[in-house]
Amino acid sequence: MPVSRESAVTHVSYEELDYKLRSLAEQIRMREKVTAIWPKHESDYVSASLLAHFLKVPLRIDGLTYSYYSGPGIEVSLVKKNSWTEHYNDSTKYFIDEVMVDEQNNFQKVTLPWQKP
Protein backbone atom coordinates (compact mmCIF):
# COMPACT_ATOMS: atom_id res chain seq x y z
CA MET A 1 0.00 0.00 0.00
CA PRO A 2 1.52 3.34 -0.96
CA VAL A 3 1.76 6.02 1.66
CA SER A 4 -1.47 8.03 1.70
CA ARG A 5 -1.16 11.74 1.05
CA GLU A 6 -4.36 12.73 2.87
CA SER A 7 -3.60 11.85 6.48
CA ALA A 8 -0.89 12.80 8.96
CA VAL A 9 -0.24 9.16 9.93
CA THR A 10 -0.46 5.90 8.00
CA HIS A 11 -0.54 2.56 9.80
CA VAL A 12 1.35 -0.31 8.18
CA SER A 13 0.18 -3.87 8.88
CA TYR A 14 2.51 -6.83 9.38
CA GLU A 15 1.51 -8.11 5.94
CA GLU A 16 2.28 -4.76 4.28
CA LEU A 17 5.62 -4.50 6.07
CA ASP A 18 6.52 -8.04 4.99
CA TYR A 19 5.67 -7.21 1.37
CA LYS A 20 7.59 -3.92 1.42
CA LEU A 21 10.71 -5.44 2.97
CA ARG A 22 10.68 -8.37 0.52
CA SER A 23 10.30 -5.89 -2.36
CA LEU A 24 13.14 -3.79 -1.00
CA ALA A 25 15.35 -6.88 -0.65
CA GLU A 26 14.64 -7.83 -4.27
CA GLN A 27 15.41 -4.28 -5.45
CA ILE A 28 18.77 -4.37 -3.64
CA ARG A 29 19.61 -7.91 -4.79
CA MET A 30 19.06 -6.95 -8.43
CA ARG A 31 21.43 -3.97 -8.29
CA GLU A 32 24.32 -4.97 -6.05
CA LYS A 33 25.81 -7.72 -3.94
CA VAL A 34 25.23 -6.77 -0.34
CA THR A 35 27.15 -8.43 2.48
CA ALA A 36 25.37 -6.93 5.50
CA ILE A 37 22.72 -4.47 6.72
CA TRP A 38 23.22 -2.04 9.59
CA PRO A 39 20.34 -0.24 11.38
CA LYS A 40 20.98 3.48 11.78
CA HIS A 41 18.82 3.91 14.90
CA GLU A 42 17.77 1.59 17.70
CA SER A 43 14.16 1.83 16.50
CA ASP A 44 15.25 0.38 13.11
CA TYR A 45 16.50 -2.96 14.47
CA VAL A 46 13.30 -4.97 13.93
CA SER A 47 12.74 -4.00 10.30
CA ALA A 48 16.51 -4.07 9.57
CA SER A 49 16.66 -7.61 10.94
CA LEU A 50 13.80 -8.69 8.69
CA LEU A 51 15.44 -7.04 5.67
CA ALA A 52 18.75 -8.76 6.46
CA HIS A 53 16.90 -12.07 6.79
CA PHE A 54 15.27 -11.64 3.36
CA LEU A 55 18.69 -10.78 1.88
CA LYS A 56 20.30 -13.71 3.74
CA VAL A 57 22.98 -11.43 5.20
CA PRO A 58 23.93 -10.55 8.81
CA LEU A 59 23.44 -7.31 10.72
CA ARG A 60 26.92 -5.81 10.77
CA ILE A 61 28.29 -2.29 11.05
CA ASP A 62 30.08 -2.49 7.69
CA GLY A 63 26.81 -3.16 5.83
CA LEU A 64 24.43 -0.87 3.97
CA THR A 65 22.97 1.60 6.47
CA TYR A 66 19.21 1.18 6.90
CA SER A 67 16.56 3.36 8.50
CA TYR A 68 12.80 3.43 8.10
CA TYR A 69 13.01 7.02 6.79
CA SER A 70 15.70 8.33 4.46
CA GLY A 71 18.24 10.86 5.66
CA PRO A 72 21.92 11.77 5.58
CA GLY A 73 24.15 8.70 5.58
CA ILE A 74 21.26 6.28 4.98
CA GLU A 75 21.55 4.05 1.93
CA VAL A 76 18.38 1.98 2.35
CA SER A 77 14.96 3.06 3.64
CA LEU A 78 11.35 2.09 3.25
CA VAL A 79 10.22 5.71 3.01
CA LYS A 80 12.22 8.35 1.13
CA LYS A 81 11.54 11.89 2.29
CA ASN A 82 11.48 14.37 -0.59
CA SER A 83 11.98 17.98 0.42
CA TRP A 84 10.18 20.96 -1.04
CA THR A 85 13.62 22.07 -2.23
CA GLU A 86 16.20 19.84 -3.92
CA HIS A 87 18.89 21.27 -1.61
CA TYR A 88 17.64 19.16 1.32
CA ASN A 89 17.13 15.87 -0.52
CA ASP A 90 19.50 13.03 0.31
CA SER A 91 21.01 10.30 -1.82
CA THR A 92 19.24 7.22 -0.44
CA LYS A 93 19.84 4.48 -3.03
CA TYR A 94 17.03 2.05 -2.24
CA PHE A 95 13.48 2.81 -1.08
CA ILE A 96 9.87 1.70 -1.61
CA ASP A 97 7.62 4.68 -0.75
CA GLU A 98 8.08 8.44 -0.91
CA VAL A 99 6.61 11.31 1.13
CA MET A 100 6.85 15.05 0.61
CA VAL A 101 8.39 17.23 3.31
CA ASP A 102 7.09 20.81 3.46
CA GLU A 103 8.92 24.01 4.40
CA GLN A 104 8.18 23.47 8.12
CA ASN A 105 9.67 19.93 7.93
CA ASN A 106 6.22 18.33 8.25
CA PHE A 107 5.63 15.03 6.49
CA GLN A 108 3.31 12.08 6.79
CA LYS A 109 4.47 9.67 9.47
CA VAL A 110 4.21 5.90 9.17
CA THR A 111 3.35 3.77 12.19
CA LEU A 112 4.74 0.24 12.20
CA PRO A 113 2.56 -2.63 13.46
CA TRP A 114 4.19 -2.83 16.91
CA GLN A 115 3.90 0.96 17.33
CA LYS A 116 0.16 1.12 16.70
CA PRO A 117 -1.73 2.33 19.80
Image: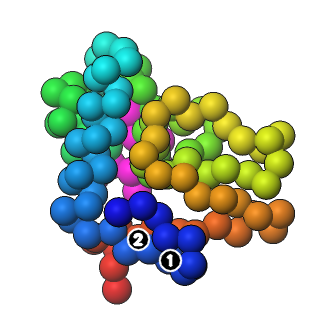
Q: Where residue 99 sits: x, y (%)?
A: 59, 58
Few, some or many residues within 10 Å of mark 1 (<14, 14–19, 20+) = some
For the point 38% across and 33% down, the residue is 38
Q: Which stretch appears magenta? A: 38-46
Residue located 33% across and 79% down the image: 116
Is residue 64 shown above or below 96? above
Occupied quadrant, residue 89: top right
Please tell me which residue is depicted at 37% across the width and 74% down the height of the picture.
11
Q: Nearer the viewer, residue 26 or 69?
A: 26
Q: Is residue 50 magenta?
A: no
C-alpha gap between disc 2 and disc 1: 7 Å
Q: Eyeballing the image, is 10 above or below 41?
A: below
Q: Is residue 49 visible?
A: no
Q: Is residue 77 visible?
A: yes
Determine the image quadrant of residue 114: bottom left
Q: For residue 45: magenta?
A: yes
**CB-based contact (under 8 Å), mark 2 and mark 1:** yes
In this view, 70 is above or below 53: below
Residue 111 in the image, given as x and y percentages of width and height: 41, 71
Left/right placement of residue 30 relative to residue 79 reads left
- Depth check, front residue: 49 or 61: 49
Residue indicated by mark 2 = 111
Which residue, given by chain and number where applicable, does mark 1 sit on?
9
Amino acid marked by disc 2: Thr
Taking 57 as reference, is 115 left or right? right
Question: Which residue type does callout 1 highlight?
Answer: Val
